[in-house]
Image (cartoon, helix red, strand yellow):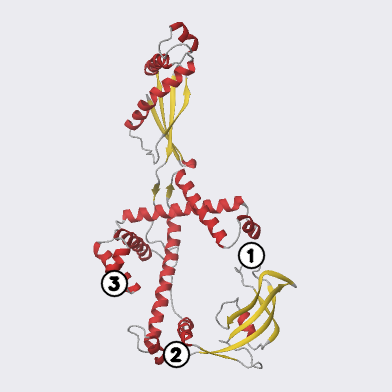
Amino acid sequence: MKFKEEKLTEKGLGKWTVTIDGAEWTNTLKKAENRAKTELEIPGFRKGKAPESEVKKHLTQANIYKTAYRIAIKPAFDFAWEQKPTIEPMSSPAPNPVKIDTKELVIDFTFDLKPEIKIGKYTNITTVEKPKNDVTEEEINDVITRYQDRFVMEKIREKNEKIQKGDSVLFDFKGFIDDVAFKGGELKNHKLVIGSKEFIPGFEDSMIGLGIGEAKIKVTFPQGYNEELQGKEAIFELNVHEITQRILPAADDELVKDLNLPDIKTIADFKKKIKNDILTQKQTQTKQQFVGEIIDEIIKDSVIEFPKSAIEHQIKELKKDFEDQVIRKGLTLKDYKKATGLTDEMIEAEISEDAKLNLQTYLVRNEIKNKENITPTPEQIDQKYVELAKNFGVEEDYVKQILPAEQVSKELEAELLTNFLFDNNGKA
């Protein structure tokens, strides 16, 4: 027998080719002919009991080749394994006869390739700038306002009074672009707190100073709002029904006392906690974004191959997620394509690209984890349980009951890997 192997990289497949020829193939054909004779079904005779003259009439070369192939498959497969191939299969190799005649049998065994990665540089990458985070007074005050809302007092303004920042307004509105009403631009009896930033920039500010009754305001939709409206100027016809003054308690020590927060006694303590919470949240978000950009750089510097089946499976999952998201928006796929102008081919291409990136990211993270031996210690897992219990305000034993150690370990492993990539990369 002869053996050779080949990677069909574009298809994500590997191939072993076994050739049986010479005396070995001649003997296999003789054995196949004898077996085929015994297996031949001839009308009027029991299997294997027909006279030679009848056997010759019914036995074809195709029968012999088919039987010879069945005989040869297992020895050919065993021979391939004995050669210790460098291309290892991820799935069971599937045999396929590519040539069979009196001189030789050639069998291809094809299979999905095992994921392979030759990872490039993954530390001291300086093409991505390290994020810097700060917290503004406005952000702190926005959080305090949400707490003040718990104790808000409301008083309906007189009919001659005007809208002020912080007021709650009950009104109807209808939007027009070039004198044509646009879809989704109309609501009746909508309640809006002026300054809540619920509406697009400029909308709420334009309402300040208006009174009860009808009015018009002009605003411009921001870039990135949606493809149909972004950057366009719109006129909104308003009908204000009611203006309510919202009286918030002072942001002082008395408010903190009413909130009854653990370990917080003064408004200064409260502001410090809020600042730390916002900063922690920002750091988590920017760290994830930074590490994502670092992984993109690592992918560019790596050689990554994965099996066809893996990419197909990932595409299938992403396509289902995409269709579910469209349905949750109350649209059919047909409506979505019409609204966005996307075609099936464009959607398929985007999903395929996302699937490829997901697999590349997984393989890169896994390779770094293995190279750096990033594995949580029992002490780190225990500490994580303590943190989770504190965050949720429950007993540690309860957290251990609902979250298996294996799950906590995996989450902690991902966290440690993210920290490693963050600490060892980036331009300061």
Q: Dot 1 corresponds to which residue?
A: 227
How far, Cα to Cα, is label 1 from label 2?
A: 41 Å
- Of tags 1 and 2, which is closer to the observer? 2
Dot 1: what SS?
loop
Q: Is residue 280 visible?
A: yes
Residue 382 drawn at (x, y percent): 26, 66
Q: Is residue 64 left or right of residue 181?
A: left
Give the total of numbered labels. Answer: 3
Q: Is residue 130 visible?
A: no
Compared to residue 349, the image places residue 5 above or below, namely above
Q: Which label belongs to residue 251?
A: 2
Looking at the picture, tell me which residue is in the foreground, 361 or 402: 402
- Of tags 1 and 3, which is closer to the observer? 3
Residue 274 drawn at (x, y percent): 41, 81
Callout 1–callout 2 Cβ contact below 8 Å: no
How far, Cα to Cα, is label 3 from label 2?
A: 33 Å
Q: Dot 3 corresponds to which residue?
A: 395
